[in-house]
Image (spheres, rainbow, N blue to C red):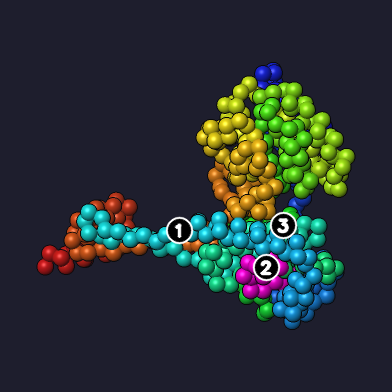
Amino acid sequence: MAVFLDTSKAGFEDAFAALLGAKREDAVDVDDTVAAIIADVRARGDAAVIELTEKFDRLTLTPETLAFSADEIDAAIATVPQEERAALELAATRIRAYHDRQRPEDARWHDEHGAELGWRWGPVSAAGLYVPGGLASYPSSVLMNAIPAQVAGVERLVICAPTPDGKVNPLVLLAARLSGVDKVYRIGGAQAVAALAYGTETIAPVDKITGPGNAYVAAAKRRVFGRVGIDMIAGPSEILVIADADNDPDWIALDLLSQAEHDESAQSILITNDAAFGQAVVAAVEARLQTLERRAIAGASWRDHGAVIVVQDLAQAAQLCDRIAPEHLELCVADPEALFAQITHAGAVFLGHWTPEAIGDYIGGPNHVLPTARSARFSSGLSVLDFMKRTTIARMTPAALAAIGPAAEQLAQSESLQAHGLSVRARLDALNR
């Protein structure tokens, strides 16, 4: 059963620290295996990718069939029921509209000395998006990764979506089509990440790799970082709900279970200022667990990582929230805006009783690729900016150089970088001739 903590009880601080510090992932050391896979792909290209795909996904490919053909994608998309197609199209429209607002603006200006300064934004040239296969094959993840890249202006978008035993999720291919993806490769694992980073005879390398994956994918992303950019190394999903007693316990229970059913390592936490309400939510969770298809997964998550924390007031809830820095945060209180103003660290916030976190996973508009494991303290969810670069601009006039150049020369001398100082001095001397 989930732990039940109370800030007014002795030992709370130690128990809360243990909750924050608990490791929720198996300590599987896959780095050596991943290093060997990457080296193999770098050395043998397509041949290595094809062999590894046959080994791990039980799928025989050739260089010509590494990617889905346009006809295969058309045929798969044609099988999508109209209701599912309409829902995915609505999600794509809303996600695109939200991310359109994130596009940054270029800027140029002149300072008081007449120097022109500024910056220009531009997209990366190519991005590779990883989409897990098997049970965790989520078309929503395609939209959340590809649409920001498309809005950013990325010229070439490709997806790696493994198809174990040749099983294809038509919704994934439809989401790719809706997102402007150029090519979908039916490969996965560390070999797919290596192919995206270094390229093969068939797969051109990209500049940035985003998207979730298992421990092998995460380890591969760590290893190729620097050769390419990556979004983040995401851990198990998590949700924190801050709720007062003026809520339906069953609603809150379902919100907690919406993350618990992702993964046995997921974490769901309720903070409330009413102990009786907290107990009612626990009872509702136990009742709902009997009815869920993924009750074994959700039950293990709730049992091993779930928590209910009783606080004295909502101000204390905000303080604990900032220490948790949750991936998803629901504020189910009478005045969510006032509480939100007291909170600094959270990946995504859902305000009010009528905003379940699941809306954010699919259709709300904001991105669902979010920082986990308390990394919301220093990072943000995926956005258009993740697929863009900022180039700074400077143009000196003779007068501007005369005004600020001597200080640059002095600082260069202070750092014993003679050529730096001389490059400025040569121009200053030319002004005095």
Q: Nearer the viewer, residue 65 or 289?
A: 289
| Residue 419 at x, y percent in the picture | 30, 63
Q: Earlier in the sequence, mark 1 or mark 2?
A: 1
Q: Measured along the vertical axis of the image, is residue 213 above or below residue 201?
A: above
List the single residue furthest toward the bottom.
64
> Which segment did they paint magenta?
174-192
User: Can see residue 346?
Assistant: yes
Q: Nearer the viewer, residue 192 or 356?
A: 356
Task: State left or right for residue 186 relative to residue 183.
Answer: right
Q: Measured along the vertical axis of the image, is residue 70 above or below residue 275?
A: below
| Residue 405 at x, y percent in the picture | 23, 57
- Label 1: element kind: loop
Q: Measured along the vertical axis of the image, is residue 172 above or below residue 236?
A: below
Cα separation, mark 3 vs mark 1, equals: 29 Å
Label 1, on which residue? 104
Could you tell me which residue is drawn at 56 percent across and 39 percent down?
345
Q: Earlier in the sequence, mark 2 or mark 3?
A: 2
Q: Quarter-wise, where is residue 30 in the image?
A: bottom right
Q: Earlier in the sequence, mark 3 or mark 1?
A: 1
Task: State left or right for residue 169 relative to residue 110.
Answer: right
Q: Quadrant of the N terminus?
A: top right
Could you tell me which residue is drawn at 15 percent across and 65 percent down?
431
Cα separation, mark 2 vs mark 3, equals: 17 Å
User: Can see residue 197?
Assistant: no
Q: Nearer the viewer, mark 3 or mark 1?
A: 1
Label 3, on which residue? 213
Could you tell me which residue is drawn at 60 percent across and 53 percent down?
365
